[in-house]
Image: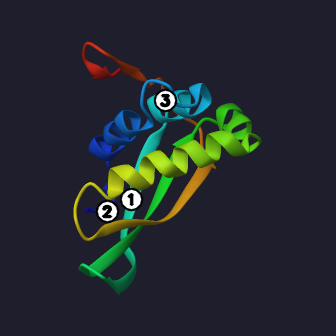
Amino acid sequence: MRRGEDEGLRLLAIQSLGAHGSPLAREALESGVMEVEPGVLAWTGSTGAVAGHLVVLWLDPELCGRVNEAPSAVDALTAAVAAAVARVSGNALAELKIAARAMTASGSTPYRGRR
């Protein structure tokens, strides 16, 4: 994994959430920006070396507040991001931080991806 914004990881997390995932978690993934700090932890697992990555999901302040007040949405986001990170062998989610910052107009459309 590379440091910085990771659009591919965000799209994999949306896919991992599935069609019946939390609507609030889906809204967060579709409108947020995901940044990765790679290799914050490392350990040896049963299949070899594992690198743990810190992922920050940046959301607009209002949405961030709603997400952080809904433990089920946080759990769904954590599971979806962990599944997305683990799609590449030897990688794992060390921590997911959900944080607020002013956002520009963004989102996802089925036709052209992010707007």
Relative to 49, does residue 28 appear above or below in the rendering?
above
Query: Left or right: 104 with respect to 69?
Result: left
Q: Earlier in the sequence, mark 3 or mark 1?
A: 3
Task: Residue 84 in the image: state x and y as whole percent.
Answer: 34, 49
Quadrant, the N terminus: bottom left
Distance from disc 1 to disc 2, alpha carbons, whole Å, reads 5 Å
Q: Are marks 3 and 1 in contact (CB under 8 Å)?
A: no
Q: In the image, what residue type sits under mark 1?
A: Val
Q: Residue 31 — which label?
A: 3
Query: Which residue was labeled with disc 1?
Result: 36
Q: Residue at x 58, y 25 (%)?
A: 23
Relative to 36, does residue 65 appear above or below in the rendering?
above
103 or 93: which is nearer to us? Answer: 93
Query: Left or right: 65 with respect to 79?
Result: right
Q: Earlier in the sequence, mark 1 or mark 2?
A: 2
Task: Residue 20 in the image: state x and y as whole percent.
Answer: 50, 25
Q: In the image, what residue type sits under mark 2?
A: Arg
Looking at the image, the residue that sits furthest to the front is 46
Q: Are marks 1 and 2 in contact (CB under 8 Å)?
A: yes
Query: Which residue was labeled with disc 2?
Result: 3
- For the rendered model, the colour scheme is rainbow
Q: Residue at x 22, y 65 (%)?
A: 89
Looking at the image, the residue that sits furthest to the top is 111
